[in-house]
Amino acid sequence: MDLLHLTPLEIESLRLSLWVSTWAVLGSLVPGIFIAWVLARVRFPGRALLDGIVHLPLVLPPVVTGYFLLVLMGRHGMIGGWLYDVTGFSFAFSWRGAALAAGVMAFPLFVRAVRLSLESMDRGLEEAAHTLGAGRTRVFFTITLPLSFPGILTGTILAFARSLGEFGATISFVSNIPGETRTLPLALYTLIQQPGGEVGAFRLCIIAVVVALFALMISDFLARRRIFLMHGEK
């Protein structure tokens, strides 16, 4: 029964993880779609550099990414200090900072999924719309965006799952504050450090595995469905 009974601390960490992951994904949607479109459609000097910067969180240690966020967005950071002085808003040591850290770590996965969807799209449909007099904005919202929706959905699911499991950047940037920044991975880390916390840690591990597997299965299903529809259209 102990394995099935979540304590208030564990419920709080799970709720906070879902909340943080949701905002991390929502904050990535517009910039992620825009950057994916730029990388897929526009040729310009420095494109490889932009691509490298976008994917940098995938290869950097998460702790390094969290430290960079602290330097930039902390209350005394280059950007965060100015933001706090002008508006009183701060990312540091709050769930907003946890969402920012999770969003930064998940951003490359979202961009990659959308970019692959855009690159696999039939450009002839966009060109036909242009020849019929449709402007770029109209073509984007009526053709490009709807056709890339499977990639957007796949990227959203992968980004959500990645945000849910974020640890290193979060603890480096916003610390491990109960009820504020202690997400599921941080709660798991805390339980491991406590005597007798093994059962709770195991419960959180099971939850994390189930959520991650569910997200991967949905992502794989959508990818297969997209391939099937593309072959069906041909």
Image (spheres, rainbow, N blue to C red):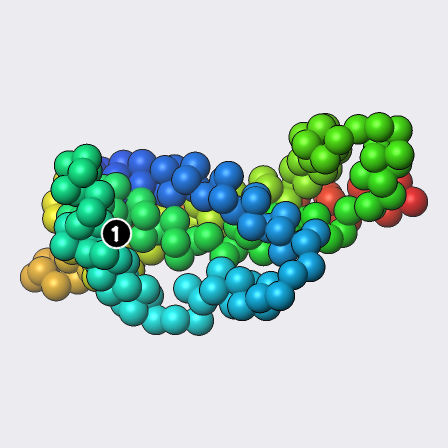
Look at the image and tell me whether residue 113 can be seen: no
Q: Residue 162: where, in percent of width, then height?
A: 42, 53
| Residue at image point 55% right, 63% down | 51
Screen quadrant of the N terminus: top left
Q: Disc 1 on helix, strand or loop? A: loop
Identify the residue position indicated by label 1 in the image. 79
Q: Quadrant of residue 8?
A: top left
In this view, 168 is above or below 119: below
- Taking depth in this image into account, of 130 and 97 the one nearest to the observer is 130
Examine the rendering and report whether any part of residue 44 can be seen.
yes
Drawn side of residue 128 relative to residue 207, left or right? right
Q: Residue at x 15, y 36 (%)?
A: 88
Numbered disc total:
1
Residue 103: image location, x then y, percent = 39, 49
Q: Which residue is more in the foreground, 103 or 39? A: 39
Residue closest to the eye, 145 or 87: 87
199 horizontally vs 32: left or right: left
Give the image location of residue 219, x and y in percent: 59, 47
Badge 1 crowding class, 10 Å Cα cut-off, few under 14, some 14 to 19, many 20 or more, is some
- Residue 24 quadrant: top left
Q: Position of residue 54 (x, y in %)?
A: 49, 60
Residue located at (52% from left, 55% from top): 109
Which quarter shows the C terminus? top right
Residue 106 higher or lower than 130, as above or below: below
Rendered position, 64 above or below 22: below
The kind of residue tagged 1 is Ile
At a point 35% along the width and 51% down the height, the residue shown is 102
Residue at the limit of the structure toward the left, as seen here: 195
Q: Nearer the viewer, residue 201 or 228?
A: 228
Give the left or right position of residue 176, taking residue 145 as reference. Answer: left
